[in-house]
Image (cartoon, helix red, strand yellow):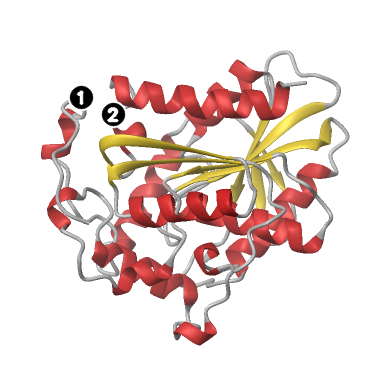
Amino acid sequence: MTAQPFNPQLRAARFLPRTVITARTLPALRFLTKLAAGARRPDAEVVSVDANVSVHVFRPTSARPRSPALLWIHGGGMVLGDAAQDSGFCRGVAEQLNIVVVSVAYRLAPEHPFPAPLDDCFAALRWLARQPDIDPARIAIGGASAGGGLAAALTLLAKERGEIRPVLQLLSYPMLDDRTTARTDIDPRSLRLWSPASNRFGWRAYLGPATADDEVSPLAAPARHVDLSGLPPAWIGVGTNDLFHDEDVAYAQRLRQAGVATTLHVAPGAYHNFDAIEPKAAISRAFAKAQTAALDEALNGD
């Protein structure tokens, strides 16, 4: 992965750091996340699913009796973030598509390594599918970054357990492959916000003791999963200047080879999380439009 110029529409790229989340910065970042959460205007109903899991429920103004739904999983490198951080996205999608959006508050690593976060997401999915106002045959699973990796893993777990059949996996620059941490050919000059150092820390925290190649579960790192057949259609979006670009493109290709209908949206010159940092840029609006169109087709199409 060689350095590439940033898209000129993304003007913040030259000012952003390459690395944000590390073991050293994590305590301060978590403190700031709590402060931000306290300052947010409540925009969702917060519901307890079980002793470990809660969800933020975004219902549209004119909800349907049996509504389609999106289960959304936030990012943060497996170690940071909360269910409210993507409230703007969740509220916007709920209103625009007239669906229910549920954002999961899952436990974080390193205190709670795999499989705890994935188990939490499955508990939220099961809860969502059982709600009387939700159509269990029209549920999509989505997430960004680490949340995208968890969404891919949750889709695999749902297939394995056979209880719920999602209609779409919406994966925004998903964190899929722990083996990327061993790469030495990545030029960090082309990266912003998520670097090889952050990636090593995030995967080490999430995998915990299971760090040896022969011990890593394919449900922890979906790119390791041998059989991708029988999964729901996928939408995968990633920028060319994102550390996850190569693993995301490879996963999309493997899904297609397994017979899974897959849309790959590549944003040229875009860095990690660009659409959240610079949402008004044309490239970010195109990214959001493509996401919404995929959801609309999967959840509201005939």
Q: Residues within 10 Å of mark 2 (few under 14, many from 20)?
A: some
Q: Mark 2 — residue?
A: 278
Element under disc 1: loop
Residue 23 falls left or right of residue 184: right
Q: Nearer the viewer, mark 1 or mark 2?
A: 1
Residue 35, numbered circle: none
Q: Mark 1 — residue?
A: 9
Q: Could you tell me the amino acid type at mark 1?
A: Gln
- Is residue 47 shown to the viewer in this render? yes
Q: Could you tell me the amino acid type at mark 2?
A: Glu
* Quadrant containing the C terminus in the rendered view: top right
- Is residue 43 shown to the viewer in this render? no
The spot of residue 185 in percent (x, y) is: 20, 66
Asked if marks 1 and 2 touch (Cβ < 8 Å), the reply is yes
Residue at image position (61%, 71%) is 115
Residue at image position (86%, 21%) is 65
